[in-house]
């Protein structure tokens, strides 16, 4: 694309238009002389949040979930004999002709015809982050109760998606070079009698997408500015005539982005403008395309920032609304037979029958006894390590958390058994009083070995590395912390055999430890559940927000604590019971809705 100095004959008309556009943009971007644009943007989002929450209260019909100077005046000028590029368009197909005089190779021609028509970031692709979609996202409405740092993150792009994006921006750069070439040539230098290669242009759709996405990120009173500055027909007319001032447009984009984005994005926005400015001055279409690519990455990051800000602002309302939201969500799906819960009902009825054959605690109220039935059944599922089992379908949106708890419990049992083996051999080698000394070493050096393994939480039981554990045990007991000092092989072998024996799921030691863990877990869980049943969802969340174990995505073995596991299990169970107790478990029939 040949960017050159504007002729005097073009200057007055162009500068008149630019002054009009610039003044309009600056006037709206300032949001008036008497107000702060940041305050207005915040007020806009506050009003939007209130409107959405009001909509939730009016009718609960969740949507199904289907997811970074002193320029000279330079502008694109047409030659005296340049013609409107629209002459090169097919009348019906709206396709652009590739001038043979450009000598594009087959690879570039294929890119023009085969690359995606829209940029990788569009209004539709960011739709999941709209506040209406966010507050109706069933997974988010569940997760917000358990994750104190819940936030959206950019999706990891697949290799195919990255390749597709690269092809799009390469095709756009080639297309811009075609527009520039056409603006500088006579029609008879472009058109000939031979067969022409045509393609559907991407630049109009790119400008339209840019306008659409920007309008979702700025307050409504700024929309006229965006529409005026990104008037697609006008921009395309300027492109075709060779008079589009990309430098001025990029500077306006940088201003509006820095006005509405988080301060940490300012440098990014300025770098984007500099990329486009440099490409514009050097007539480098690839550099311009790179700047546009950066622009859309920034827009995606801004949308994520807005969505995460909304989650933080609405957290209390979203958490306290959990039960009503879930009851409405599942009521609709039970009524339309979209959600099968017959097996879940059978699971609960079987637990009730089992409970009726056992002694009941007289102190428990009937209501809590019904909930306790569910907690006992859930604890049984968490302590079954012989083979992976699925949880009842009513726990579908909690299954990830339950599988993780199951994995923690399993490793907690392994840790207790390993400690018993260490104490056994330590007492043979050193006085019992030394147990306090070796416990810190056990946590620091041996527990991390139990964290190893890439086992799937839903898969088979994690088997520790007995040899590595035995070697660490021997070094800890003998006090040989220097890895270059060897310990006797027979001592390591004896420890390894003891570990294998006690960690075998068929061994009496393992079964006793498993039973003791189950009883302690159930007791702690029921204690927390009684307390949580008297609390609001937000009060429950608040009571757990300071627990180090509960607020780590992948907590170390050092922080795994049975009481913390019981707190999380009680939290899951109480929310579950408040939703599914009246909807299913306490009904005579799941069809009685």
Image (cartoon, rainbow, N blue to C red):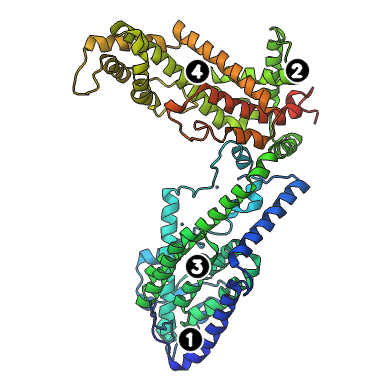
User: Label 4 neighbourhood size at 10 Å, few (<14), some (14-19), many (20+)?
Assistant: some
Camera-nearest label, 3 or 2 = 2
Q: In the picture shown, does residue 209 fall above or below 53?
A: below
Q: Earlier in the sequence, mark 4 or mark 1?
A: 1
Residue at (34, 74) in percent of width and height: 103
Seen in the picture, residue 363 relative to 589 is either above or below; the reply is above
Residue 233 location, quadrant: bottom right
Residue 197 placed where, x, y %?
44, 71
Disc 3 and disc 2: Cα gap in Å? 68 Å
Image quarter of residue 461: top left
Please report whichever mark, 4 or 3, sits nearer to the chain's N-terminal start: 3
Q: Is residue 141 visible?
A: yes
Tell which tag, 4 or 1, sits nearer the viewer. Answer: 4
- Residue at the spot of label 1: 83
Whole-number angstrom distance, CA of label 4 to CA of label 2: 32 Å
Q: Are marks 3 and 2 in contact (CB under 8 Å)?
A: no
Q: Position of residue 449 (x, y in %)?
A: 36, 24
């Amino acid at each position: 694309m040949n960017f050159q100095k504007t002729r005097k004959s073009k200057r007055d008309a162009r500068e008149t238009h630019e002054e009009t556009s610039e003044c309009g943009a600056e006037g709206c971007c300032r949001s008036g002389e008497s107000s702060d644009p940041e305050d207005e943007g915040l007020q806009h989002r506050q009003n939007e949040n209130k409107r959405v929450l009001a909509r939730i209260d009016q009718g609960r019909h969740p949507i199904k979930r289907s997811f970074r100077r002193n320029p000279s005046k330079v502008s694109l000028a047409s030659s005296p004999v340049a013609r409107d590029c629209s002459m090169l368009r097919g009348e019906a197909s709206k396709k652009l002709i590739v001038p043979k005089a450009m000598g594009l190779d087959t690879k570039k021609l294929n890119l023009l015809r085969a690359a995606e028509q829209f940029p990788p970031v569009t209004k539709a692709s960011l739709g999941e982050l709209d506040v209406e979609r966010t507050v109706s996202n069933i997974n988010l409405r569940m997760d917000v109760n358990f994750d104190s740092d819940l936030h959206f993150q950019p999706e990891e792009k697949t290799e195919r998606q990255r390749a597709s994006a690269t092809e799009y921006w390469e095709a756009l750069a080639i297309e811009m070079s075609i527009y520039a070439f056409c603006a500088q040539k006579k029609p008879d230098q472009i058109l000939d009698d031979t067969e022409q290669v045509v393609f559907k242009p991407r630049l109009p759709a790119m400008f339209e997408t840019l306008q659409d996405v920007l309008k979702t990120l700025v307050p409504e009173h700024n929309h006229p500015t965006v529409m005026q500055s990104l008037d697609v027909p006008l921009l395309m007319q300027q492109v075709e005539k060779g008079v589009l001032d990309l430098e001025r447009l990029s500077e306006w984009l940088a201003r509006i982005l820095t006005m509405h984005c988080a301060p940490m994005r300012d440098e990014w926005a300025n770098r984007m403008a500099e990329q486009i400015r440099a490409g514009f001055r050097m007539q480098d279409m690839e550099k311009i395309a790179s700047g546009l690519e950066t622009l859309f990455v920034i827009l995606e990051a801004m949308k994520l920032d807005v969505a995460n800000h909304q989650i933080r602002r609405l957290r209390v309302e979203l958490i306290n609304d959990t039960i009503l939201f879930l009851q409405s969500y599942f009521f609709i799906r039970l009524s339309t037979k979209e959600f099968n819960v017959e097996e879940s009902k059978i699971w609960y009825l079987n637990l009730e029958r089992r409970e009726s054959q056992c002694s009941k605690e007289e102190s428990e109220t009937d209501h809590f006894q019904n909930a306790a039935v569910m907690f006992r059944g859930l604890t049984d599922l968490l302590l079954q390590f012989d083979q992976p089992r699925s949880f009842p379908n009513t726990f579908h949106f909690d299954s990830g958390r339950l599988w993780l708890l199951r994995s923690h419990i399993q490793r907690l049992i392994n840790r207790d058994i390993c400690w018993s083996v260490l104490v056994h051999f330590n007492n043979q080698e050193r006085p019992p009083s030394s147990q306090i000394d070796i416990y810190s070493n056990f946590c620091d050096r041996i527990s991390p070995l139990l964290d190893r393994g890439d086992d799937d939480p839903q898969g088979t039981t994690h088997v520790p590395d007995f040899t590595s554990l035995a070697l660490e045990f021997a070094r800890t007991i003998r006090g040989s912390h220097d890895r270059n000092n060897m310990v006797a092989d027979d001592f390591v072998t004896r420890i390894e055999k003891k570990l294998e024996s006690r960690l075998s799921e068929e061994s009496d030691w393992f079964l006793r430890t498993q039973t003791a863990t189950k009883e302690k877990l159930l007791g702690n869980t029921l204690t927390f559940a009684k307390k949580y049943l008297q609390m609001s969802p937000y009060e429950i969340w608040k009571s757990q927000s300071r627990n180090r174990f509960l607020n780590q995505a992948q907590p170390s073995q050092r922080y795994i604590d049975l009481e913390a596991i019981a707190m999380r299990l009680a939290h899951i169970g109480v929310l579950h019971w408040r939703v599914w107790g009246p909807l299913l478990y306490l009904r005579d029939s799941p069809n009685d809705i």
